[in-house]
Image (cartoon, rainbow, N blue to C red):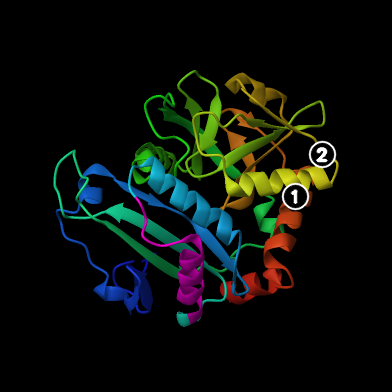
Amino acid sequence: MDMERFDDRTGLIWYDGEMIPWQDAKLHVLNHALHYASAVFEGERCYGGEIFKLREHTERLLEGAGTMDFEIAYSADEIDQACRDVISQNNIENGYLRPIAWRGAGMMGVSAQQAGVHMAIAAWEWPAYFSPEARMQGIRMKWAKWRRPDPATIPCKTKAAGLYMICTLSKHDAEAEGYADALMLDYRGYIAEATGANIFMLMPDGKLHTPTPDCFLDGITKRTVMALAGDRGVEIVERHIKPEELGDASEVFLTGTAVEVTPVSQIGDYAFTPGETTRALMEAYDALVMRQYDRTALASTSAA
């Protein structure tokens, strides 16, 4: 199936404080971020015209830029408003936003103090294509050959562009073999995360276990789902989890801005049956983000 290219669309992109036509958003080939991955970004979702957890994403973007040793010239309030403007001026009801900040072309080399800093925000429609019943079938995953490295070697608490290189490699490898995603271990051999999502496991003690995020991103969606679970009396245990412990899990699901709450039916040789705990949290998350929006109706419209 042909996909619409992201550089050949209509609409407006917020670029360094101005709304410009989509196809006018261009970069020089000697941009520092292109060569050295000196960029931080966020992935955000808009439901019914409202951006979910907008301030949390904006704060993480600003903090990430600081960790990457550059300063974004806009305040959190200004960035939040720019995100809302992008949604409204592109008439997006249900979509995905990508704010990104990066070092420019003022310098080329490892040292880049005078490279300049830029920021842009793009958004596009992203409706819900699957009903809860279809999602409850679960996705199939394989083990990634790449591992999340020691936090002494990377800024693991930032959503920095370079950290996703092994995610792309792992995702491509999984898709080439017919899987939806890959599960990465960390440098010690413990379970870490999927290529763009955190993981939860329902264990025999009736609690949801999830890896301690000490060498990968502690997801905003993950924390949201943890709160929803707590509201329903489900205890969360964050700890280091060995791969073989998946054999004890009865339910497994992923969480993330893009995947929301996604049930998992297989990881390598381990099989799971998405059950009531997964369904309850999936529906609770849907209700939280969609508010009064009818997700099922949207899925039916999209499939027609």
- Is 75 contained in the magenta span? yes
Residue extending farthest right:
233
What secondary structure characterizes most of the magenta part? helix
Q: Secondary structure at mark 1?
A: helix
For the point 75% across and 49% down, the residue is 281
Q: Position of residue 189 (x, y in %)?
A: 51, 19
For the point 17% across and 55% down, the residue is 105
In-image side of 253 versus 86 (left or right): right
In the image, is residue 103 above or below residue 148? below
User: Image quadrant for the C terminus?
Assistant: bottom right
In the image, is residue 44 above or below residue 39? below
Cα–Cα gap, marks 2 and 1: 10 Å
Q: State the residue in front, 167 or 178.
A: 167
User: Which residue matches tag 1?
Assistant: 281
Q: State the residue in front, 203 or 55.
A: 55
- Image disc number at residue 234: 2
In-image side of 47 versus 66 (left or right): right
Name the kind of residue labelled 2 in the image. Val
Mark nearer the viewer, 2 or 1:
2
Residue 66 in view of the camera: yes
Label 1 near label 2: C-beta < 8 Å?
A: yes
Which picture quadrant has residue 68? top left
Sequence-first tag of 2 and 1: 2
Residue range of the region highlighted in magenta in the rendering: 71-88
Q: State the residue in front, 218 or 125.
A: 218
Which picture quadrant has residue 230? top right
Residue 172 in view of the camera: no
The residue carrying pointer 1 sits among few (fewer than 14), some (14 to 19) or many (20 or more) residues within 10 Å by Cα, namely some
In-image side of 176 versus 95 (left or right): left
